Image (spheres, helix red, strand yellow):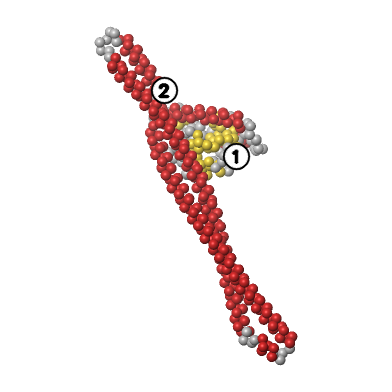
Amino acid sequence: MIVWCLFLLWSLEMVFVASIAADDPLAPSPEQLRQLEIRIRTLQSRMHDTQTEYGQRQQQLQQQEEAIGKIVERMQQLERERHACQVNLDELEQQRAEQLQQLTAQRNVLAQQIRAAYLIGRQDYLKLWLNQESPDHIGRLLTYYDYFNRARADQIEAINDTLAQIQTLEKAIAQEKNRLNELINNLNHRKMALDTTQLERQRLLTDTLALISSQEAELKRLQEDKQRLSTLLGGLDSVIKQLPRPNTPPFHQLRGQLPLPVEGKIARQFGEARAGRLKWQGLLIAADLGEKVSAVAAGRVVFAEWFRNLGLLIILDHQHDYMTLYGYNQSIEVKVGDWVNAGDVIGRVGDSGGQPQSALYFEIRRQGEPIDPRPWLQP
């Protein structure tokens, strides 16, 4: 628009100058006209370069935000592995404690047996044979001695088995601790990579925002993004009709029953002024970075990737011409084609799409047109 206006003004000026050049001795010289044309072309070139640079920065921003999403996803996986490893380590240490208690009890029993054997052993077999008691009594004593010796041998064997089990547990605990340390180190490296990438993203975002500081440029961009989103939803409609449809209650019956997709504060309402004549077509919900984003109702994932101005975007189809949109995510935890139930976690709150603060953008669409989500939410 700006380039066209400049060209129109220049063309009119050329016509005006040409009409008076023959009669007016003060008319601009051919050299002055040439310099004016050069300045106009220079301005056009600068505006073209700015537009090209903005497109390149948007592409870089997309790559960085997608990288952040993958890093966060990997960090969540490592955190789950670390938790499972810690649980396993706690169980191993509990088993070791139980084995040590058992070993102490076994050693006490063996000590008692040894003391008893010492006391009984003061009379050897010869004294028993020379004893004037009946042979039956002597036989019972010998049987008792044999039983006592076997019990003591069994107790020693049990102690050895317990010691072997403790050694096995000690080895397993050492291995699990090493694995836990590796997971923690890996997690720390991922956090450092995340911090670095987020800093780079912030610098890129600051530079990018400087390129689109004027309200006219912002308005034009939002209008283009609005049209692109409508085109996307229109294209998805033909694909959605080919997908299998589970037997679920119609979405329109959920009016007034839907929960917020994330715990947070509604910062922008449907219909509020946004830029120029544009208005918000959904709700902007301020929430902490990384907060869980949940599906408000059962549906099919029909879109799950980066989309300009909405960042990492998730679109759910709820059949009967209803869709819900979840934008500005930090990471996506579903893929296209997945069937999700109400309350299932589908992503994490972020600031993708070039947003200055973490928040979730939430829309409800009927037949491709945005509708006010507030009447659909729980009181």
Where 103 falls versus 69 (above or below)? below
The amino acid beneath tag 1 is Asp
Report x, y in % for residue 376. Answer: 57, 36
Q: Is residue 145 left or right of residue 259?
A: right
Report x, y in % for residue 307. Answer: 50, 34
Give the residue drawn at x 29%, y 8%: 22
Give the residue drawn at x 58%, y 77%: 111
Report the residue marked by disc 1: 338
- Name which quarter of the figure residue 157 lies in: bottom right
Q: How many marks?
A: 2
- Name which quarter of the figure residue 9 lies in: top left
The amino acid beneath tag 2 is Met
Residue 270 in view in this figure: no
Q: Is residue 60 left or right of residue 250?
A: left
Report x, y in % for residue 164. Answer: 58, 67
Label 2 environment density (alpha carbons within 10 Å; few <14, some 14–19, many ≥20): few
- Name which quarter of the figure residue 325 lies in: top right
User: For the residue labelled by badge 2, is the local secondary structure a helix, a strand or a loop?
Assistant: loop
Q: Nearer the viewer, mark 2 or mark 1?
A: 1
The C terminus sits in image quarter: top right
**345 or 377, nearer to the observer:** 345
Give the residue drawn at x 71%, y 91%: 132
* Separation (CA) of disc 2 from disc 1: 43 Å
Report x, y in % for residue 54. Answer: 41, 31
Point out the residue furthest to the top here: 23
Report the residue marked by disc 2: 1
